[in-house]
Amino acid sequence: MTEYLQSTFLGFELGWFVATLALILMIALPLMLAVALVIYADRKIWASMALRRGPNVVGPFGILQSFADGLKVFLQETIIPSGANKGLFLLAPILTFTVALLAWAVIPFSETMVLANVNIGLLYILAISSLGVYGVVIAGWASNSKYPFFSAMRAAAQMISYEVSIGFIIISVVLWSGTFNLIDIIKDQQGHILGFVNAYGLNPLLFPMAVMFLIASLAETARHPFDLTEAESELVAGYQTEYSSMSFALFWLGEYANVLLMCALNVILFWGGWLPPIDWEPLYAVPGIIWLFAKMFVFFFIFSWVMATVPRYRYDQLMRLGWKIFLPISIFWVFLVSGYLMLTRYS
């Protein structure tokens, strides 16, 4: 698309700008639609596990319920507390939602379908995802209310704790693949196990890291059982307690966009990305983006399953898991993987 538009009357620079803008919209608009649909799926999964019906009135099978909820919050009045810092109060949800979208710039949907195929894609995602905590902290502080502030402090501590472990887990994958490029990491998984299974996750050395990354993904996105930032029993509702209307909705959109991002990263780093599960030629007739979305839905189902069945951790248990269990194990695993590679691949 870029080369075609550059060859038209638009010229090189304007053609590049128009093509890039079109690609951004091709990712952002379907992503926002997907967020609405996964909210519906989330509620249906919870309802099924609790033997309830879930959304079933608005639209066929209730599929339009998320859009009705979106219209409702759009029509509501935005209320700003009198003691709040108005500028930062309004900036926080915008920052949270924007950062959640920025990370998708380097996510490859297939070998050729990616907005920015950069060699430091993993580093970019780590950098962008670490900015998400600023929106939460600003929201908690600008609300001028003690409960949102407590929630913001919890969120900052929680995200920092598990980002450290996630970083070391990713280092193990980078050592094995030899690259930070997400497309190259996926390609390296082709036929990785026994010559025909496309996955790192079944590798005995990397499987523990795959499990830890999944659990750390739940904590990083503040999903149950690690949703201490939104623990309604002691924080009313969390950092978004004082928010209403679309400012409240932006927090939810950003949260679910981050959940989808972590599902995509689980698939890309350990389960073959757009590759079919088995390296068998007929399976490649299915478009890679279909395989990617199917695998992402499996992980999203796991996220919802855990939320519907696992009781919430205490905050001290959350910190203990991150600092005393995940961090030592992930550091040890970096030494283990690098030592194995030194003895085998680089000897």
Image: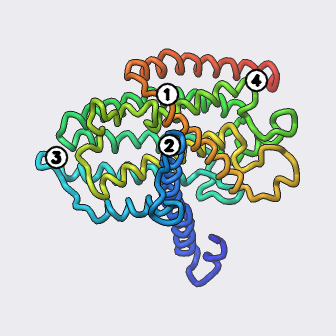
Is the residue marked by circle 2 packed among few (<14), some (14-19), or many (20+) residues within 10 Å?
many
Q: Which of marks 2 and 3 is in front?
A: 2
Q: Name the residue type under label 2.
A: Trp
| Sequence-first tag of 2 and 1 | 2
The circle on residue 343 is none
Marks 3 and 1 close (CB-CB < 8 Å): no
Q: In this rendering, would 196 be left or right of 184?
A: right
Residue at numbered disc 4: 341
User: How far, Cα to Cα, is label 1 from label 4?
Assistant: 23 Å
The circle on residue 46 is 2
Q: Nearer the viewer, mark 2 or mark 4?
A: 2
Where does residue 321 sit, x and y in percent of width and height? 48, 20
Q: Nearer the viewer, mark 4 or mark 3?
A: 3
Residue 40 is at least partly visible in this image: yes
| Sequence-first tag of 1 and 4 | 1
The circle on residue 164 is 1
The circle on residue 84 is 3
| Sequence-first tag of 4 and 3 | 3
Q: In this rendering, would 128 be left or right of 95?
A: right
Where does residue 141 sit, x and y in percent of width and height? 23, 39
Q: Which one is nearer the viewer's eye here, 65 or 261? A: 65
Q: Which of marks 1 and 4 is in front?
A: 1
User: How far, Cα to Cα, is label 2 from label 1?
Assistant: 31 Å
Where does residue 76 sit, x and y in percent of width and height? 26, 62
Q: Residue at x 31, y 60 (%)?
A: 73
User: How far, Cα to Cα, is label 3 from label 1?
Assistant: 32 Å
Report which quarter residue 10 is drawn in: bottom right
